[in-house]
Amino acid sequence: MICPRCDDSRADKIFEAPEDGSWELYRCPRCYFVWRNTEEEEVTNPDLYDPRFKLNEEKIAAMDPKPPIPPIRKENRTRHRDGG
Ligand SMILES: [Zn+2]
């Protein structure tokens, strides 16, 4: 299965409808995109996926961590109840 967002060929089925198999869920191991096979072609088909939201190795490497990781505190290790 090709990931619609980053075109990685390793995307694989991770789940399916337990009762009747009427839908399947896929996940990409590179960009972590998850989609159902029952979604629109613009979501499931790599050729029709909106180019503005496409990802590649370069774009993924340039992403900031979410949530951002704060710098390590070297001083003032006192913990406050309000989290500050
Ligand atoms: Zn992907």
Image (cartoon, helix red, strand yellow):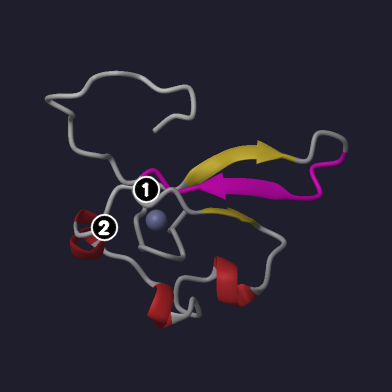
- Frontmost residue, 51 versus 38: 51
Question: At 46% from the left edge and 65% from the top edge, which residue is drawn?
Answer: 4
Element marked by disc 1 = loop
Question: Nearer the observer, disc 2 or disc 1?
Answer: 1
- Crowd class of label 2 (few under 14; some 14 to 19; many from 20; radius 10 Å): few
Label 2 with label 1: CB-CB less than 8 Å = yes
Does residue 36 appear to the left or right of 17 in the view shown? left
Main secondary structure of the magenta stretch: loop
Question: At 27% from the left edge and 64% from the top edge, which residue is drawn?
Answer: 56
Q: Where does the magenta region start and end?
A: 20-29
Q: Which mark is residue 63?
A: 2
Check residue 80 for magenta coloring. no
Judging by the rendered image, the residue that carries numbered circle 1 is 66
Residue 51 percent coordinates (x, y):
40, 81
Does residue 79 appear to the left or right of 82 in the view shown? left
Which residue type does callout 2 highlight? Met
Which residue type does callout 1 highlight? Lys
Q: CA distance from mark 2 to mark 1?
A: 9 Å
